[in-house]
Amino acid sequence: MTVIDQPYAYQRRELTEPDWQRFPGWADVTTAQWESAQWQRAHCVKNLRQLREVAGPGLSEAFCADLERDQRERATMSMLVPPQMLNTMAPAAGPGEPGFTEAFYADPVRRYMIPVFSDRRGDWPSHPYATRDSLHEAEMWAVEGLTHRYPTKVLAELLPTCPQYCGHCTRMDLVGNPTPTIGKLKFGMGRDDRLAAMIAYLKATPGVRDVVVSGGDVANLPWPRLEAFVTGLLDVDSIRDIRLASKALMGMPQHWLGDEVRAGMERLGARARERGVSIAIHTHVNAAQSVTPLVARAAQAMLDTGIRDVRNQGVLLRGVNDSPEALLDLSFALLDEAKIMPYYFYMCDMIPGSEHWRLSLAEAQRLQHQIMGYLPGFATPRVVCDVPYVGKRWVHQVSRYDTDLGISYWTKNYRTGVEAKDELALSREYPYYDPIYVLPEPGQEWWRARQQDPVAVA
Ligand code: SF4
């Protein structure tokens, strides 16, 4: 039989839980402790001192200084890394062994969860058009925290916290603790009033059939409050799809494996089936090594509650997953070993400090092309650009693209509340921008000239 050489060689890989006891700070941690959500929450790494305590002297002083500088001068998110996630970084290296710091520096999960100053671009740390709330979600709040950005679906931001904080978080405006350079937007209303106002809006707006229940991360809402909110949604006749957004399914699978959560999800699953409504969990995994046996167990536990699906929306990040091998390895690990449906890869949004992570549209289009044909069609993730004021667009749907200046132009086919009276909303082209440092030199020069003219980049 002839074996044909392919650009990507599929190979089934067994999932592994890296040995957490390789970290000096966790040398005595038992399996029972590791699998307890309470232990994971109590031992999250929140600062450099705690990272040092876990990793021991194997992490070099130079790395620590690099991290400290980033926290002080660039970080848009404060540090919060559950042990489960930290343990998947440099999984084959022991902190006591030579080369640990180098492996830690190079690790894809480290690159987005524990960014350091030297990761970022010195020339263009931020795009001139980067903004906090780059998707204008707050501008489209129908009630506080409820973004009505598409005709038939809404995003409900229930809370501004997560069990883990990702360096590239698109909701850096609202989510997490303030950092030395970034203050955070605060909800004005109390939580219960806000959540009640969301349900009231949805009852009064039958055109909305789909609710993304998010935050933050719903894993940080006390279970009874989350169950009450989702039950409230299930009582709204027009709601047909409910998606619970939780990166913690990967970052802290112990939460979703807890007895209270599983029993509660079973109740919600049963009620949803009675009502003919689909509940799914949407998670956020960016690297194959994050898919461990515990993550697969959590996904299976959720599917066993009778919900419709567990799906993944990853983010395309340079240095993390910007190759066809990385995207396909991740998609196969999710699909084959954890029963999680690979679904979307978003281009990283244009928030401050994200340039080193962002890819150009041309790079994203190339990746989409390269991953076609390996996975089943239903599990082939779409690479999408979330264009400000437009919404998610498949990367090949661009209307026009100036590759010299790195400006793509997009159109839309629906109005949001902010354009209700805008007659040109559906004929206008909306721009999106490539990172400047990947452009040909004349394009970079064009942007440098504009940067010196504050009016041109206002
Ligand atoms: S889990 Fe999601 S909302 Fe929370 S910090 Fe990460 S990207 Fe942001």
Image (tube, rainbow, N blue to C red):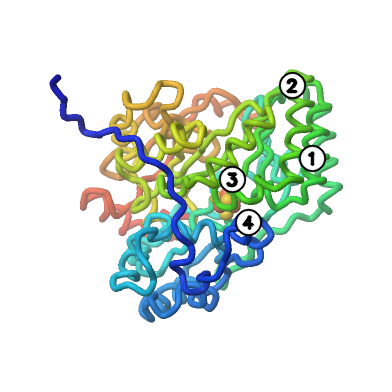
Badge 4 crowding class, 10 Å Cα cut-off, few under 14, some 14 to 19, many 20 or more, is many
Name the residue: 51% across, 57% down.
85
Cα separation, mark 2 vs mark 4, equals 29 Å
Q: Is mark 4 within 8 Å of ligand 1?
A: yes
Residue corresponding to mark 4: 163
- Amino acid under disc 1: Glu
User: Which quarter of the figure is the N terminus placed in?
Assistant: top left
Q: What element carries label 4?
A: loop
Nearer to us in this view, 330 or 203: 330
Q: Earlier in the sequence, mark 2 or mark 4?
A: 4
Q: What element carries label 3?
A: helix
Nearer to us in this view, 298 or 19: 19
Determine whether 452 is above or below 289 in the image: below
- Amino acid under disc 2: Arg
Residue corresponding to mark 2: 273
Badge 1 crowding class, 10 Å Cα cut-off, few under 14, some 14 to 19, many 20 or more, is some
Determine whether 448 is above or below 138 in the image: below
Residue corresponding to mark 3: 249
Coordinates of residue 261 in the picture (x, y in percent): 73, 44
Q: In this view, does 292 lie to the left or right of 421?
A: left
Does residue 355 show up?
A: yes
Cα separation, mark 1 vs mark 2, equals 15 Å
Q: Which mark is residue 89?
A: none
- Amino acid under disc 3: Leu
- Of discs 2 and 4, which sits in the foreground? 2
